[in-house]
Image: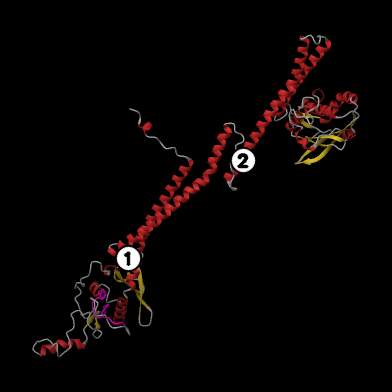
Amino acid sequence: MPPLRSLVPVPHLTLHRKAFIALAALLLALLLIFVGFSRLGLQRGLGPYVAEIELARMDWLAERLQSHHTQTGGWDSLRGQPSLWGRLTHPSGGSRGPGGFRPPNGPPPDRSSPFAAPPASPAPSVQSGLLTQPASAASAPAANDSQGGRGTDPGNGPPPRPPNDDLRPMDRGAAPPQRHPDDIYPRLGLLDAQDQLVAGTPPQPGGARLALRGASGQVIGHLVLAPPQGVRSEADQAFLVQHLGFVAWTGLAGLALALLLSGWLARRWLAPVEALATGARGIAQGHLHTRVPVHGNDELAQLARTFNTMAEQLGSIEASRRQWLGDVAHELRTPLAAMRAEIEAVQDGIRPFDDKTALRLHRQVMRLIQLVGDLRASLDAAGTSAPSAQVPVHPLSLLGEALASMRPRLAQAGIDVDTTGLDALTAQGTAQPAPLVRGDAQQLHQVFLNLLENSLRYTDAAGLLRIAARLLPPADGVPQLQVQLDDSAPGVPAHELPRIFERLYRAETSRNRDHGGSGLGLAICRAIVLAHGGTLTAEPSPLGGLRITLQLPLLDNPS
């Protein structure tokens, strides 16, 4: 039986899918946290809100307590008497209930309310902390007793007062009125002006508070109402469910919109990455013309520009390599073709093998050896990051030695040499130390020989070569030695000046190679100079030919 892993294909999660899944999971977690905190906040905030509303509707109780305080002169009558507190807080506990109590200058009581009480009787008097009946009410039973114990005739006298019409004296142990299970009485409390508990429930966190004021407006106490514990009523539960449902649907709609937005953002953000991956695969397969689109100026856009620059440089390097290989093959083909022609001519009997033929063959062989040596030297110079032997050397002495070795050939070619500028700096050596550079004397000597050889090869007869040297002010804190070589016509076209330091490049491609050399001399010079920390540039010469400017950093202490 094959393993289960081979039967169930595992989908490949791309970077785009991973980003979308991560964003979706984050948004879903945020939605759940939002709903959970919303439910918790509603459950905690609904109780204080309900308490505030319930206490705002109990102005009748506030007026009843304020009237009781005025009649008794304080709250001492309520301390330790839960039965009296229960009767005062009961809606039908006396003539001053929500239906039977008539506030000053207020509307008549509503008789349609099930809690409506009979018409208010005269205000009861207070004795020893207990409310008692007024005198007129106390004489009514006596009148009834004088009539043989019969009650008052309903048609001839006033109706009898209900038993609970006022707060009659009760025993201290009398039970408080019966209450509904959802009554707010167990959550009510009374505090005096010093916030000390008088009766009822102590204040709770989140509870409501209503100030009680005396006749002159001063605060005499506070009526407090603790918030309900939990959501018990059906109306509260319905409100909570409705609100949470609204929050949930709103969150789901926001989640759907956020998922669509996250998918679009993931696709937009990761599209440059996918383009870079495709471009990198193209470069790896050898398609150096591959480029990636660039959008915007953010980090991904900068990465795309860097990739395109890299691809362009790789293409340039590959093109230069192909051109270099072609140039090398062409350079090698020329002496080989000449040698082949000489040998075939001898074999066919067209030309005898004499000393002249042997000399021509030897010249072609030496040319091949020189070409191979120059190629190897150019490669070694280009790959050298620093001179092989870093010792203090005198560049002007090396230039003088190279010029001394080239003077006979220059004179034979009819080229005059002007060293006035060089001699002026050399003559200063008696007054101050000669300039010193740190590098390889053999390589620097080769540079000066190649530069003089280049002027010799490409300067017309009866021409002029001017050599000058001077010390430049310190650049970046390092003094510089500048050497200039100016030759007379012919010159180099301006558009070809940047390329004359390339390998195997000639300003005149039709020039005879026996006269023009291998085209590697200036390339070798520039590689060596760069390895010594200097620069080598070319520009038109005032003499009508080419000016080569060489700059080398000098030692800080030439002594």
N-terminal of the pair, mark 2 or mark 1, is 1
20 sits to left or right of 505? left
Residue 352, magenta (yes or no): no
Q: Residue at x 47, y 44 (%)?
A: 19
**Which residue carries the number 2 mark?**
306
From this viewpoint, which residue is outermost toward the left?
A: 148
Q: 10 Å neighbourhood of mark 2: few (<14), some, or many (≥20)?
A: few
536 sits to left or right of 196? right
> Which quarter of the figure has residue 465?
top right
Magenta part mainly helix, strand or loop? loop
Q: Which residues are drawn in magenta? A: 88-103
Q: Position of residue 475 (x, y in %)?
A: 77, 41
Q: Nearer the viewer, mark 2 or mark 1?
A: 2
Q: 10 Å neighbourhood of mark 1: few (<14), some, or many (≥20)?
A: many
Is residue 372 among what the camera can see? no
**Which residue carries the number 1 mark?**
227
